[in-house]
Amino acid sequence: MQAPETVAGVAVDVAARLAAIGGRIAAAEAAAGRKPGSVALVAVAKTHPAAAARAAIDAGQRAFGENRVQEAKAKWPALREAAPDLALHLIGPLQTNKARDAVALFDVIETVDRPKLAAALAREMDRSGRRPSCLVEINTGAEAQKAGIHPAGADDFIAACRATYGLPVDGLMCIPPADDEPALHFALLAEIARRNGLARLSMGMTADFETAIQLGATHVRLGTAIFGPRRARGG
Ligand SMILES: *Cc1c(COP(=O)(O)O)cnc(C)c1O
């Protein structure tokens, strides 16, 4: 048997998994009566080596997610040379002091979750002229330890992102509590987006993306289904 680390083996696996996932997304769109191609797949490459991401690029995948600025900075500038049209999404918590790197590196920042960060991103966009699209992360389960805006404060925060900070906010993102029915959280996120006139909904991961598509996801974020189990992080 081929060792899972070999580049050729990774490429075959990643291409086959992407094809299978594409089929499942299409089936879920059809089942929900949604237009073919209305859901974008964001391939979450965190902890996986550049070779795995490269295999996905070679298979035609163009949207990718990373949850750490440092890891993205090490991995993606070289990969972008191979595929200048790819879109890199930040899906992990962002420290204010990394706003500069985040604005420089990412095309979509999915985790805008507090006024101080919104202000830092706005400053950096003004300074650099780069304007990655922004999603507001909502803590739909109102979990104490979790990032994201409390649902009760969502409308005010979205309004402030637009009016006070002038951020290009065009959607919402959530990570439901691990032990809860995800459908309730997806429906809540969709409702907050609807009443705020936001078109993009980033919701659904490997375990629940078909439910998310049923409830209106425009972006699903899949890691394990494409790249296999995550690696331990190196130093
Ligand atoms: C890691 C991660 C994912 C991907 O999770 P899988 O279950 O491996 O598909 C999606 N969204 C966020 C925010 C993540 O951190």
Image (cartoon, rainbow, N blue to C red):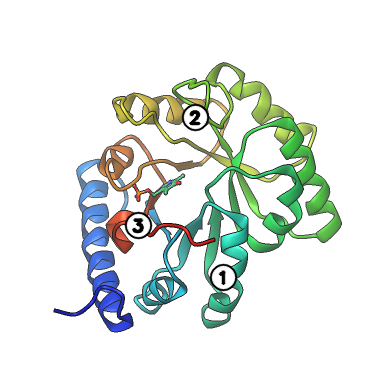
The answer to the question of whether label 2 and label 3 lie on touching residues, with beta carbons closer than 8 A, is no
Alpha-carbon neighbours of circle 3 within 10 Å: few (<14), some, or many (≥20)? Answer: few
Q: Residue at x 74, y 60 (%)?
A: 130
Q: Earlier in the sequence, mark 1 or mark 2?
A: 1
Would residue 202 be found to the left or right of residue 70 on screen?
left
What percent of the width, then of the height, locates residue 186? 38, 31
> Residue at horizontal 25%, vertical 79%?
9
Q: What residue does disc 2 label?
A: 194
Indicate the position of residue 98 as horizontal and vertical percent values.
Answer: 72, 51
Instruction: Please name the amino acid that badge 3 sits on.
Output: Gly
Q: Position of residue 168 (x, y in %)?
A: 68, 46
Instruction: Tell me: residue 200, above or below residue 11.
Output: above
Q: Residue at x 57, y 54 (%)?
A: 68
Residue carrying label 3 = 37
State yes or no: discs 1 and 2 in contact (Cβ < 8 Å): no
Name the residue type under label 2. Arg
Q: Earlier in the sequence, mark 2 or mark 3?
A: 3
Pick the front one: 1 or 18 = 1
Rounded to the nearest angstrom, the CA distance separating label 1 from label 2 is 33 Å
Q: How many marks?
A: 3
The residue wearing badge 1 is 76
